[in-house]
Image: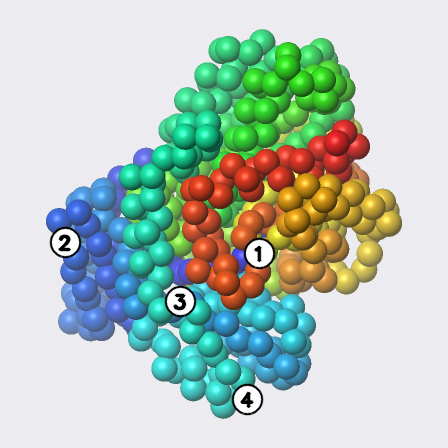
Amino acid sequence: YGIASPGTHQRDKRNRPLYHSVDFCSRVTVRSETGRFAMSRLWIFALVLGAVGSATAVPVTNATQQVDYTGHSILSIVPETSDQLNVLFRLENEMELDFWAEAKLPGSPAVVRVAPEKLLKFTEKVSEAGMTAKIEVENVQKLIDDERHEARFTTYSSAPLRFQRYLKNEEFEKALMSYSKKYDHVEYTVIGKSYEGRDIIGVHITKGKNKPIIFFECGIHAREWVAHATCLYIIDQLATMYEKDETIKRLVDEYEWRIHPVVNPDGYVYSHTSDRMWRKTRSVNKKSPFCPGTDANRNFDVGPFCGVGTSNRPCAGTYCGESPFSEPESRAIKNAVEAAKGRISFYFSLHNYGLMWMFPYAYTDKNAPNHKDLLTIAERGAEAIRKATGTEYTVGTIQKTIYPVTGSSVDWAYEKAGVTKSFALELQPRMRAFDVGKGFMLPAKDILPTAQETWLGIRAAIGSP
C-alpha cells in the first residue's frame, strides 16, 4: 500500500529510454555505468523547452542509467496530536514527499524519504509544528547500491535458485512457462497487456474443473519486490510439491489457484532498470507528461473516485488516474476477476512492508457485513505465522490498520465483485526503526523466509495448515 515518489523518466511503449524529464524545483541526478551528471535549476533549459513545445528535456541513451538517491534521507516522525498529523498530510502533498509509512493516528510513526534540497524546509516545518524528525538513514543510494552488490555477488546455497535473488520480469515469464510445461496441473495464462505492451502473466493451478478459486494479485506497486517473489514461491510449492505433500495435494484438488506475480510489469521493469523507488504504472498522463504513471491500487471503481488517501496530481505517488480503470493493469485484474465471478472464494493482494494482515474496508470506517468472519480468518493466518516463526502481524481493516484510501483492489473485489473473503497483506520487514533501512529493499537472503511464513499463514487462513 505505501506512498511513492514522483516520476522522473519518460519512456516509449517498450521501455526504451526517450528523455530524462526535469523537476525544475529540485536537483535531478542520473547514474550510469560510465558516470553521473547532475542538473540544478535548469531555468535556461526550461526556456529552450518552451521554444520547442512538447520536447522533453535531456536525452537518455544508456539503458543502464539509474535515478540517483545520493543524499536522500529516511526520517521518522511521531505526531502526538491531530493537528501535527494534519501538518504531515499537508507537507506530503505540498512538497510531494515519498512517505514509506504514514502515521495512522496520533502517537503512531511516519517514515518519509526526503531529497537533500527539501530536507531543511521539511525539518523546519516539522519543528515549527512541535515535532522531531529523526534521521534513520542518511543515504538511500547506499541501500540501493548494497542491494545491487548483494544481487551480483551473494548466493545462498540452501535456497532454491529462484529465491536467492530478485528476478527480472522476463525471468518470471520463463519460470511460469517452465512450470506449465513440466507439470500438467499448471497452466500458463495472460490476463492482459500493460501500457507498454507487456504480458500480465499468471498461472492456473488445479486438478479438474469448476473448483472454487483462490485469486492472487502481486506487485501492483512496482518497488515491493518481495511481494512478487512470494507469489512465485506459492506457485513453486503448488507446482512442485503436489505429488510429495498431502496438504498441498488437497489444496490443488479442492481449489483452483489463479496467481499473478507481476500485475504491474512496466513499473517492475522500470524499478530494475531506472528507478528502484518506482511505485506506479508507466502510462503517460496527458495533462502532465513529465509525470508518468498512476497508482493502480487507487484506480479501482470503489468509494468516491480520487477520494481519501489519493491524489489528483499526476506527480504524486498516489495519483488516482484520469478515471476509474484508466490503467490497463487495473482493467486486466478487473476482467480476470469478473471472468470468474461467483467462483472466487479468496482474494489476496500482496504488498510490502509492515507486517499487516488487512481486509475491507479501506475507504470507510464502517465494518464490512461479515467483519467477524474476516477478522477470524486473518487472525488464524497471523497466529499460524506467530507460532511458527515469532513474526507478529497486526490484524484489522485497511482503514484502521494502515490508512484510509479509496480505489483499492481489495475493496473493489469485496464490494463490487462479491468476493467476501478479500485480504491485503503487507509482508516483511516489520515497521520499526531497526528495519527502516530495509523497507522496500528487503535483502535477498530474506526472500525465502518471508515467502515461507506467508505461505504458512495463507494455508492456515483458508483452513489447511
Residue 130 is labelled as: 4
Q: Are marks 3 and 1 in contact (CB under 8 Å)?
A: no
- 111 vs 329: above or below: below
- What amino acid is at disc 3? Val
Q: Earlier in the sequence, mark 2 or mark 1?
A: 2
Crowd class of label 4 (few under 14; some 14 to 19; many from 20; radius 10 Å) = few
- Mark 3 lies on a secondary structure that is strand
Amino acid, disc 2: Gly
Residue 373 position in % (x across, y down)? 85, 45
Left or right: residue 3 versus residue 13 is right
Location of mark 3 (residue) = 137
Residue at the spot x=77%, y=62% of the render?
365
Q: Earlier in the sequence, mark 3 or mark 4?
A: 4
Q: Amino acid at mark 1?
A: Arg
Q: Which residue is mark 1?
A: 430
Q: Can see residue 415?
A: no
Which SS class for mark 2?
A: strand
CA–CA distance in space, label 4 to label 1: 27 Å
Q: Secondary structure at mark 4?
A: loop
Q: How many marks?
A: 4
Q: CA distance from mark 3 to mark 4?
A: 22 Å
Q: Position of residue 15 (x, y in %)?
A: 31, 39
Classify 10 Å Cα crowding around label 3: few (below 14), some (14-19), many (20 and above). many
Instruction: Locate the C terminus and report the quarter of the image it occupies.
Output: top right
